[in-house]
Amino acid sequence: MKLYWDTPEDIAEQLFEAQPETDPLSIRFTDLLRWVTELEDFSDDPQDSSEGKLEAIQMAWLEIYKEENA
């Protein structure tokens, strides 16, 4: 599955799979950007990132993290 900035839920799922013990709120946006762009299926332009897009990914990841650690 290809990942793009406008699919934050899909990106969040892959981030959770790669980092299941990591609290998404503990990640700086600079690190989050790097982790997203390093995902094997990420196919978008890294230059198209924005704080809003990273925040959407972080919040989607947080939801998954909370569900799995409840």
Image (cartoon, rainbow, N blue to C red):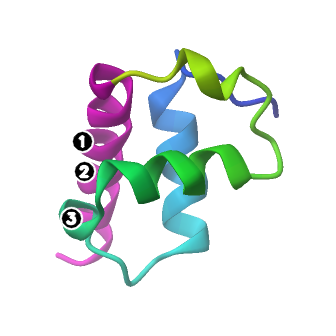
Q: Earlier in the sequence, mark 3 or mark 1?
A: 1
Q: Amino acid at mark 3?
A: Lys
The residue nearer to you, when weighing 68 against 55, is: 55
Question: What's under tag 1, amino acid-wise?
Answer: Met
Residue at 71% in and 20% down: 45
Residue 66: image tag: 3
Q: For the residues marked 1 and 2, what is the alpha-carbon distance in whole angstroms?
A: 6 Å
Q: Secondary structure at mark 1?
A: helix
Do the CB atoms of the residues marked 2 and 3 lie less than 8 Å apart? yes
Q: Which residue is mark 2?
A: 63
> Does 49 sit above or below residue 62?
above
Amino acid beneath label 2: Glu
The location of residue 7, given as percent across then percent down, is 54, 23
For mark 1, what is the residue?
59
Q: Do residues under tags 1 and 2 come within 8 Å of each other at their CB atoms? A: yes
Binning the other alpha carbons within 10 Å of mark 2 as few (below 14), some (14 to 19) or many (20 upward) gives: some
Seen in the picture, residue 69 relative to 17 is either above or below; the reply is below
- Magenta segment: does it hold 64? yes
Element type where label 3 sits in the image: helix
Is residue 68 or residue 3 the one in the foreground? 3
- Decide if residue 50 is on the left or right side of residue 14: left
Residue 5: within the magenta? no
Q: Is 50 displayed left or right of 47 in the figure?
A: left
Give the residues drawn in magenta, as a range.
Answer: 51-70
Q: Residue at x 52, y 15 (%)?
A: 6
Q: Nearer the viewer, mark 3 or mark 1?
A: 1
